[in-house]
Image (spheres, helix red, strand yellow):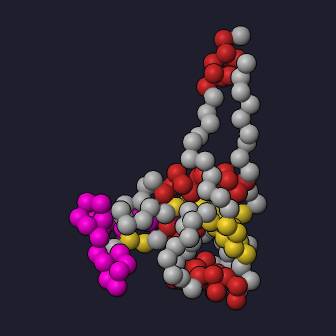
Amino acid sequence: MTEIVNRPSWEEYFLKVAMLVSERATCPRMHCGCVLVRDKRILSTGYNGSIPGDDHCEDVGCRVVDNHCIRTIHAEMNALLQCSIHGVSTAGATAYVTNMPCTNCAKSLIAAGIKEIVIFSDYHDTLAEDFFKIAQVELKRINQPDNIIEYDLGNYSSAKKK
């Protein structure tokens, strides 16, 4: 008998996607992933990484100024920039982010018209939460989704044999 696996909620699903996206991050100080979504459709993804053509932190080390790595573009900014490059509006979208956005990313998300932020992990001191309140952007904290992907090849294999 095949075990029935519960489907993740939409919030869990998109955060799991953000977790997978974060695996592409190239700054060892923090692996962060962001998925921008509107109407249950992914608009773009982003992770912490260097500007195109520059070295990656994991290869040559971080460039730290005031305790922040300035070599990388944050996940939220990379997701917004992908929308910009491809002419995709972010107005009214939701950002699913593995970590609480930093202050600058929060301001950028607000200015880009993001109306909701869903996270499961906090970040060190940031004014993001204050800015989200001022801009009336909803901030949701949920539990970290399970990091195991439930993929059942058994049902497909047995169905294919019939």
76 or 128, which is in the foreground?
Answer: 128
Q: Residue furthest left?
A: 60
Residue 147 in view: yes
The residue positioned 70% from the left and 85% from the top of the image is 133
Q: Is 14 positioned to the left or the right of 39 in the image?
A: left
Magenta part of the protein: which range? 46-70
Q: Residue furthest top?
A: 162
Q: Is 93 positioned to the left or the right of 87 in the image?
A: right
46 or 33, which is in the foreground?
Answer: 33
Image quarter of residue 115: bottom right
The residue positioned 45% from the left and 53% from the top of the image is 23
Image quarter of residue 135: bottom right
Quadrant for the C terminus in the image: top right
Q: Is 135 positioned to the left or the right of 84 in the image?
A: right
Query: With respect to residue 58, does 131 lie above or below?
Result: below
Q: Is 83 positioned to the left or the right of 160 in the image?
A: left
Query: With respect to residue 154, does 85 lie above or below?
Result: below
> How far across and down, in percent of the image, does residue 106 sit?
58, 79
Query: With respect to residue 6, does 114 lie above or below?
Result: below
Quadrant for the N terminus in the image: top right
The residue positioned 29% from the left and 70% from the top of the image is 62
119 or 107, which is in the foreground?
Answer: 119
Query: With respect to residue 65, does 85 lie above or below?
Result: above
> How far across and down, in percent of the image, does residue 33 sit?
52, 61
Q: Residue furthest bottom?
A: 134
> How far across and down, in percent of the image, does residue 111 sit?
63, 83
Magenta run includes residue 12: no
The residue positioned 67% from the left and 51% from the top of the image is 13
> How far across and down, in percent of the image, does residue 80 sit?
56, 71
